[in-house]
Image (cartoon, rainbow, N blue to C red):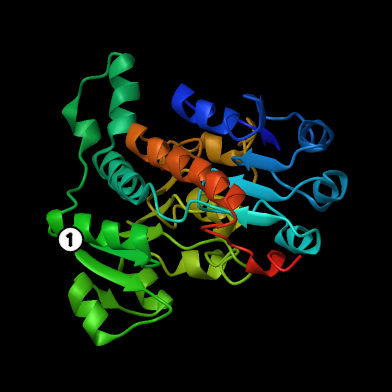
Amino acid sequence: MKIVVADPIYLPEEYKGKLEALGELSIFDTMPPSMSEFIDRIHDADIVLSGRYGFSKEAFEKATNLKMISVWQTGYDHIDVKSANEHGVLISNVPIYAFDAVAEFVFAVALNMFRKLHVADAKIREGLFDWRDYIGNQLMGKTIGVIGTGNIGIRVIQIAHGFNMNVLSTTAHPNAERETRLGTKFVDLNTLLSESDIVTLHVPLTEYTEKMIGAEELSKMKSSSILINASRGKIVDEAALIKVLKEKGIMGAGLDVFEEEPLSADNPLMQFDNVVLTPHVAFLSEESIEECTYTCVENVENFLKGNPQNVVNPEAVDR
């Protein structure tokens, strides 16, 4: 078996040794500059471990030996699943990890935004020390709206209780027992947007969630509220968000993900001092990436044993 790590993932020696024991291992620790370079890396691979780089229809057509992709994350929207199914390539992901890291990140951003920490840091470096410039807001008593109540959304709800916040949430499967157990109030999206001081997104990117937060939805938010997106960039209509920020329709935003990554230097989002930008790192803690790598490598081991796990496209199995 030829095993290729096609773009950067966290792979300490322990896990590198496990993969070397399974087959001929090639490791690429830089992002490919183009799809043609990516194809060059994986064209004769049997198994690919991959982080974020897009796996296109062309890549599947050229990688004729490919049998399995082990994705070093939960999301796999960057992979052409239809092509994977057509070519009989099984995809496994890491479905449960980093929900503590992402949930904690949400509150790091919320505290930063409400207490103006990024502004204070910049100003004090300029020699400005007047406390009157940095009057912010507490989280206690505020309302947080959690869109999506999977593992991450649930953890956000739990942490919010520690700040004595009111919690609203949306879910595809509301029921009274779950509402009571989670300590939230299930409401429709419009109600959540109009009543929340913080709106935070925790849904996967699908055809139903793409641009689910657009101009109409943003117009329903309070002018004193903030939007946090540590999910997927395309869930928010970026052009609409830029417009509402210019018009001060909301107080600000914390964005870890973007419609196009990496974020270009001329993106208008770079110009706002009421926007906190991070490079898709909400998941990134020592604990979470260790857990992710463990499962990613275990997915390969179990596939080779004939017992695939964490499969996201069972349609490919028959092929």
Q: Is residue 9 above or below residue 58?
A: above
Depth check, front residue: 141 or 285: 285
Q: Is residue 13 above or below residue 140?
A: above
Secondary-structure class at tag 1: loop
Give the residue number, with chain letter if any, for mark 1. 165
Neighbourhood count class around disc 1 (C-alpha, 10 Å): few under 14, some 14–19, many 20 upward? some
Give amino acid for label 1: Met
Q: Position of residue 252 (x, y in %)?
A: 40, 48
Say which quadrant the N terminus sits in.
top right
Q: Position of residue 187 (x, y in %)?
A: 33, 79
Q: Is residue 201 left or right of residue 178?
A: right
Depth check, front residue: 212 or 40: 40
Which of the 4 quarters of the picture holds residue 115?
Answer: top left
Identify the residue at horizontal 16%, vertical 60% (top origin): 161
Identify the residue at horizontal 36%, vertical 35% (top origin): 285
Identify the residue at horizontal 50%, vertical 52% (top origin): 74
Q: Position of residue 297 (x, y in %)?
A: 51, 41
Residue positioned most to the front: 305
Q: Is residue 45 left or right of residue 119?
A: right
Mark yes or no: residue 244 visible. Answer: yes
Q: Position of residue 157 (x, y in %)?
A: 25, 62
